[in-house]
Amino acid sequence: MFQLYKARLKCLVRSKENIFWSYLFPILLATCFYFTFGNLWTFEDYESISIAYVSEGGQDDALKMAMEEAHTDNGTPLFVVNYTSEKEASKLLEDNEIEAYILGDSDPKLYIKNNGLNETIIKSFLDSYRRTSITVQTILNNNPKALEEGLLDDLMEAETFVYEVDNGKRPDVMLIYFYSLLAYTCLFASGWGLDEVINIQANQSHRGARVSVSPVHKMKLFLSNMLAAITAQAGGITLLFIYLYNILKIDFGDSLFPVIVTCMVGSFTGLALGAMVGALGKGKVESKEAIVTAIVLGSSFLTGMMIVNIKYIICKFAPFLNYINPAALITDALYSLYYYDSLHLFYINIGILSGLTVVFGFIAFLGIRRKTYASI
Amino acid sequence: MIVKVKGLVKRYDKLVALDYLDLEVAEGEIFGLLGPNGSGKTTAINCILSLLKYDKGSIEIFGKPMSADAYDIKKDIGVIMQNVAVFEALTVYENVHYFCSLYIKDKAKVKELTEEAIRFVSLEEYRNFYPKKLSGGLLRRLNIACGIAHKPKLIILDEPTVAVDPQSRNKILEGIKRLNQEGATIIYTSHYMEEVEQICTNIAIIDKGRVIAKGTKDELKSMISIGEKITIETYQGNENMVNELKAFPNVFSVELRDNRLEIKSNRGKNNLVHILDYLNKNQISFGRIVTELPTLNDVFLEITGKELRD
Amino acid sequence: MQVFKLYFKIFKQNLFSILVYTGLFVGILVMISLNIRREEEKKFTSKEIPILVVNEDGNNNLIEGFLNYLDAYVTYVPIENDEEKRKDALFYNEVYYILTIPAGFSEAFLSGNEVELRKECIPNAAETVFVDTAINDYFNMAKVYRKHMPNLSIEELNFYIENNLDVETSVAFNDNGSKNVHKGSDNYYMTYFNTLGYILLACFVTGVSHVLLAFNQLDIRRRNSAAPISNRSINIQLILANLVFVLSYVVVFFVIGYLFNPNKVIGMGTYLYWLNTIVFALVTLSISYIIGITVTSKNAIHAIATALSLGLAFISGMFVPQEFLGKAVLRLASFTPAYWFVKANDTIALMSNYSWENIRQIYLPLGIQLGFAAAIISMSLVISKRKSQQAS
């Protein structure tokens, strides 16, 4: 048995394609993610927003002052303000010289071209400015001495009242991308699983026919081949994990053991999934490969690997999908390890994932149990 | 009997691939299964190996019923399939080693046998090559090495010489003879009658899933009426001459085609001498004369009315 | 046109695989469309964000007033008071935000002491920032009122604050009276076509290369070169066949985009997006072509297709808008045609009208894409010519 295992392993790791898929590709993709999301959710290189301001010509223009003084935490001014006529401002906006213009200061109107992040920032700024000025008016009407009592300073000193519960685990969207990448890589094992089944089925490949006439029990050969496949897969996962954990410094929560368990179970799920597709029906190998690829890529897409919002859409409109989508189960298991103190959710996800694996594996077993065929 | 097939029937939907096929292969034989493409040779082999389900009949190998789980039987069979079945990712040596290790537990023994098999098919120079780099003939030889390395008692070769250059083909045929001399019983399928004639001690001709004739080469030939075929090149042939020749003893068919006189006769002495005498007497000039003994193709032709190779 | 016909015969043989991939990509595209629509509908409209409030402070006027105020921004979702259940709700996005009001909060706040509310929320959703702002605004304002109008009752306080916070800046699109304006759909289309770029890459590289592979097996190549058809003619026929394949796909994707677009107006902007997409389809075609004639195994093609499409999509802003990407990534991406495709889409989205000055802005990105296509195609013709005489 060990010899069979060794020979098969040799076969697997020598195939350039296998090595690319399971070893190189995930690392490539992780690097892509890292650079893409590296400064995605922070505003470190915030660039001042160009706007135009059409004032009503008042002497004491508080809005103008407020806009000029506004800056981010690290001192970058929030806005670069052009003072123009309305016509000019409209032209500037059209030519994309500015992102928006503001008309008037007592009841400022915001003119924009596009709905985006910067427009939201400008609008929030204006809202907050106007609310503050109404507050000032109301208070001054009731308490004329308020200014001397430091009303303006108090207004400027906006306090934060809500704080994230500090359990050292700030939620992080970037992690979902990396976790789903890890899930994607786990499911790559389906390629190995499919291969192993094709290679042992007499009606699917010449090699399958050849080994079927040898005196080795089919299941024994199949299991040692699968074992070799899982070993090769484990190598790929380990490499990716080391890369994520030690080089990209991705946070996997406090203890690594359950993370490793997740990757292992996930790989088995992939293996069983591929084996199941391989064992079902008599279709062309190419067709089966297409099906496996579509399942793996599709389930990773639904997990949010490409666009993270898809995950939330699924949660909202088709939550059951998350319970049968292996990529989602792996991702959620990993995320629950990072985010939650208890292992409750982790167990649920791993439980369902193991269940799926057993079901896939059983179907695969039924398919390959057969030793003689109606046609080859 | 090493292999005994009785009343084997295999249908693919409506197509009857094997129609009550009977085969018996005795120990030490090189048994040839000869038939045109699509006659059911490979189906028969796949059924014998329990790769295919069959509808009726029984198969015994080494006196025991064959089944997919009959590992003790499989252990002593070597199979060389029509299609090359080796691993692209393994070298020549590793491929042979792998397949040998499926049959034999002892590691040292596997190594020894692997070396021997590689020598046997003369692939020593290529032992570290990957299959991709081998030409068609070399690849076939590797395929054979993978099938025989474990020194099986029964070797089944399914068209091992398809698409193989003459040099490799001769090597393969010689190898098969040698394996037989070393004690292995061999089942050999082919649609090349020359190959079968050349090496097989016993032959079954099959067509449409049925054995239409069996026996040794000579037995088969004696089954048909043709004893000799004489072809004479002449530009002076005519109807009259054909009729006169037909009246000769032993001659049963005379045909004149493209200035060639084709005379088929029963077995008999001096058939050619009589004809030459006749030609001389009538001062008919002639060119080349060819006399042939009947081939298996003639056997096939006579039984089925069609050529072995279309 | 024998080669042309043969192309589609081979295509038919691979039909099942191609259909599976098409199904996958159309599915992805539909999901993406739904996602964009959902995002669009949320923008600049009051949102009903599901939140859970855990009130450990008990009911009093301040809290009631606050919750009343917050009701305008959120939807309260009742969830069992159980730590696990709450976290599950958050995890599965049943609620976006869990706000905990600690015991003694009101008293401390009213007497001017330091106070803190606690929150747990789903990762980095814009919605949660929105809730943060609403909560902070309320208490900031309440604090200022309390300080400068100490005699205010809590009812009055609530009244003032609500009046105050009701104020919202009116936002208008700068339409400048120009025609052809169909804003709102532009964001849909921008995102739609940007992500379509990924689909084109993944779909075409897989499909086209697969078929081409069949043509480029050594024996077939030799037989073709032995036939009395010039290498050029073979290539031109192949390129034509590919064009038919790619363009018919592109049309399907246009239709899907149109069907899911909430704004069913086809205007100048739509034509520009289409033009850009067709240009990019040509680029992907050229990429598929060069892969199809240089790579010799199906698995390798598959690997390259997946790696190339996902890699390019991430660095060039097909999934994540370019404005969010780092400068270094964008600089790297600008050496790929994908970047210019996205750039052109973004530029089209920003156009407020379709004057020539505006349209001119996309000449450069379109030109660069065409340049890529031309360069890659001529490179593959050279390779193809050389390969026709190669030994392996």
Image: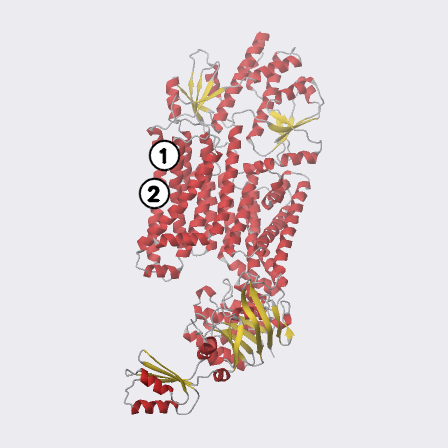
**What SS does tag 2 mark?**
helix
Identify the amino acid type marked 2.
Answer: Gly
Query: Can I make out residue B151 in this image?
Result: no
Is A173 located above or below residue B147 in the figure?
Answer: above
Q: How crowded is mark 2: few (under 14 residues within 10 Å), some or many (20 or more)?
A: some
Q: Which mark is residue A203?
A: none
Query: How many numbered marks, from 0 up?
Result: 2
Please state the horizontal and vertical placement of residue A225, each as a whole percent of the image: 59, 60
Please state the horizontal and vertical placement of residue A26, each as a whole percent of the image: 52, 48
Please state the horizontal and vertical placement of residue B266, each as a whole percent of the image: 43, 87
Q: Which residue is drawn at 64% across and 51% down?
A: A359
Quarter of the view holding residue A8: bottom right
Real-space CA distance between mark 1 and mark 2, rounded to the nearest whole angstrom: 14 Å
Query: Can I make out residue C240 in this image?
Result: yes
**What SS does tag 1 mark?**
loop
- Left or right of A155 in this view: A91: left
Is C252 located above or below residue A219 in the figure?
Answer: above
Residue that numbered label 1 is attached to: C362
Relative depth, front residue between A196 and B252 = B252
Identify the amino acid type marked 1.
Answer: Ile
Residue that numbered label 2 is attached to: C371
Name the N-terminal-most of marks 1 and 2.
1
